[in-house]
Image (cartoon, rainbow, N blue to C red):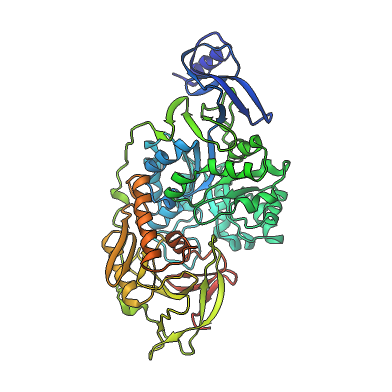
Amino acid sequence: MTEKEALRRQIDAAAGRTKADLVVKNCRIVNVFSGEIESGEIAVLDGVIVGTEAGFEGRGTVDAEGRFAAPGFIDAHTHIESSFLSPEQAGRMLVPRGTATIIADPHEIANVCGLDGVRYMMEAAKGTKLSILFAMPSCVPATPFEDAGAKLDAADMEELLADRRIFGLGEFMNTPGVFRADDAVLDKLTLARRAGKIVDGHAPALSGRELNAYACAGILGDHECRTAEEIRARIAKGMYAMLREGSACHDLRNLLAGVTEASSRRALFCSDDCQPKTILTEGHIDRHLRICVEEGFDPVTAVRMATLNAAEAFLLCDRGAIAPGRRADIVLLDDLKDFHVHRVFLGGELVAEEGRYLPELSLADISAVRGSVKVRDFSADRLKVKLRSGRARVIGVQKNSIVTTKEIVTVRTDGGGDFVFDPARDVCKLAVVERHRGTGRVGVGLLGGYGIKAGAVAVSVAHDSHNLIAAGVSNEEMAFAVETLIGMEGGMVVVKDGRVLASMPLPIAGLMTTESAEWVAERLGAIHEKARTELGVNPDMEPIMLLTFMALPVIPALKLTARGLFDSELFDFVPLEA
């Protein structure tokens, strides 16, 4: 069928001259354009809504039984890799929660596997009914000071950026480069402009002239807002403010204070990094909606932030509303308070009912993204440090935040100046081991507030370069954990006294698995339980997710890479010794 023929069919059905494929009857339509709830019916043909009033005839009908019909929800910024699931399994998890579209930045796998990783994600996305729109990772590596598995410059990006499934450049984390108008940064920004693609943002704590420069560069929005004031500042500059609620970052309630009824049109919902357990038990974008209503927001305004706002921001004119000409992404909700999802139609097809994903899964080949852990010259001795004074810089962790503090602590040392764990003080050793190119680099630092009292935790997910990261009470325990990870082709592990207490292999680039969300939630739950009960990790901390962000140098204030301690406020390395 030609495009012209398809359009003729839809117009004829909209005009009532021919039957629709499906009519959803007896529903209350959430109209995100008018802000009203309308009683009516939804007629669908060829996956497109052709009418929203009573009187249509369809070859099939569904009785909504008075339920609310909302547009499919849109996650404005997420990393599939942070769910530890393949795209197919992520779709199986998200669609029953009412999520129809996600804006996914695959920079995690790009940092490990380069363009091969992006291509794998695009191929795997074909195996789910979830609409996955990808960004071209813009900062691989995230900074010039990291050891990633790949490096992507503007020339590398050009071919894939032209693909229609790539909406634009992903979160632009090199904010100093934008402010300085660095040549390499301008090459990427102008490449996106020439391709007619947008650029997503990442601008923690940016303000004043630096924020002016960032907005002037044409960057769409920011998901790193930490305060209501930062929300207001970005909206005032014409940017979109992305309100994040994930597994490690619980920002939404705080950020909603910066959103008014008028400014809500520039507010979007995003999860950024969210684990299966969180989504299976608390929800995805439906959780954002519940929180908004609890905080006093009008339900229709909240639904608009979850749908139309994101569609308009990302130039997705075919979705985001229940109206003629839009994709038939329809979520039937029991109410507009708890937002319990009864049924989900994507492109007019019933794909989920009462929490069950209905289509069969078809998994893509993962051979091109396996075998990504390549470590050279590693042993327990590589974890030793030499402190002359015992005064050391410590990365301080905070509850429900990936932002760290810079602490200076006097620690115990042995005769050679190596750190000695003191059970009376909440400071442990932290290490990042390069795992992509066999450089042999090992960065060692100290972590405060994690609470660990025995053993070690190690994981091959360490944003954004995804080297191996381990925290523990001794060099021997940490080395055993790292060596176990190497043998697993990546994943996560909890060890004590030279024994593996819990583990989860992640063979896809050391980041993901093709197993189900339920399998991941069960394995991860066991890891969390052992980390807390056997190792003593702080019960107020998420043991794995928090650890994965301790190597992310673009988030304030102090982080650790394979090259050493990095101070994001100075944008430079600092010595361990204070």
Total numbered badges shown on the rendered structure: 0
Residue drawn at point x = 54 percent, y = 63 percent:
399
Could you tell me which quadrant the N terminus lies in? top left
Of all residues, the one furthest to the top in this rendering is 17
Residue 127 % position (x, y): 36, 37
Residue located 60% across and 17% down the image: 53
- From where the camera sits, is residue 57 visible? yes
Residue for point 64% across, 23% down: 38
Answer left or right for 233 relative to 281.
right
Between 380 and 570, the one lying in front of the other is 380
Q: Is residue 90 above or below residue 525?
A: above
Q: Quadrant of residue 322?
A: top right
The reply to whether residue 460 is in sight is no
x, y (%) of residue 361? Answer: 33, 36
Where, by quadrant of the figure, is residue 383 drawn? bottom left
Task: Reply above or below: 89 against 434.
Answer: above
Q: Is residue 281 left or right of residue 334?
A: left
- Above or below residue 544? Residue 201 is above
Left or right of 300 in this view: 550: left
Q: In the rendered view, tell whether residue 327 sits above or below residue 202.
A: above
